[in-house]
Image (cartoon, grey):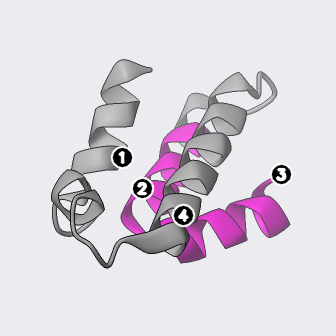
């Protein structure tokens, strides 16, 4: 779980930890991170999915934070 959190915080395009520290980060950036973490926790806790399916959805959520979360909550659940 800790590895997944680190990948989420450092693997989305530019370094998200640096982006969080910028003054323009704002509420929208925080909301995206919270929704990403909620989606990943929901995905990990789903016992009915195969491991390959979980990996694919996790990659979609991590590398496309906004679109990935939207797709996961509307199509993936």
Q: How many dots with numbers?
A: 4
State the mark number for residue 62.
2
- Is 71 inside the magenta-drawn segment? yes
- 58 is within the stretch colored magenta: yes
Binning the other alpha carbons within 10 Å of mark 1 as few (below 14), some (14 to 19) or many (20 upward) gives many
Q: Residue at x 49, y 55 (%)?
A: 33
User: Which is in the foreground here, disc 4 or disc 1?
Assistant: 4
Q: Quadrant of residue 19?
A: bottom left
| Horizontal side, residue 24 vs residue 77: left or right | left
Q: Distance between the Cα atoms at labels 3 and 1?
A: 20 Å
Of discs 3 and 1, which sits in the foreground?
Answer: 1
Q: Quadrant of residue 64?
A: bottom left
Cα gap from disc 4 to disc 1, whole angstroms? 11 Å
Q: Residue at x 63, y 63 (%)?
A: 69
Where residue 65 appears, as percent x and y from the top left, is 48, 66
Query: Which label is found at residue 77?
Result: 3
Which mark sits nearer the N-terminus, 3 or 1?
Answer: 1
What separation in Å lies between label 3 and label 4 (alpha carbons)? 18 Å
Q: Earlier in the sequence, mark 4 or mark 2?
A: 4
- Depth check, mark 4 against mark 2: the one in front is 4
Q: Where does the magenta region start and end?
A: 53-77
Cα separation between marks 4 and 2: 11 Å
Question: Image quadrant of residue 21?
Answer: bottom left
């Amino acid at each position: 779980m800790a590895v997944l959190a680190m990948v989420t915080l450092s693997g989305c395009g530019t370094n998200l930890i640096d982006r969080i520290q910028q003054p323009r980060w704002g509420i929208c950036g925080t909301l995206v991170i919270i929704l990403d973490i909620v989606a990943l926790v929901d995905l990990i806790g789903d016992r009915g999915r195969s491991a390959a399916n979980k990996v694919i959805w996790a990659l979609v959520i991590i590398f496309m934070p906004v679109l990935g979360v939207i797709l996961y909550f509307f199509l993936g659940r």
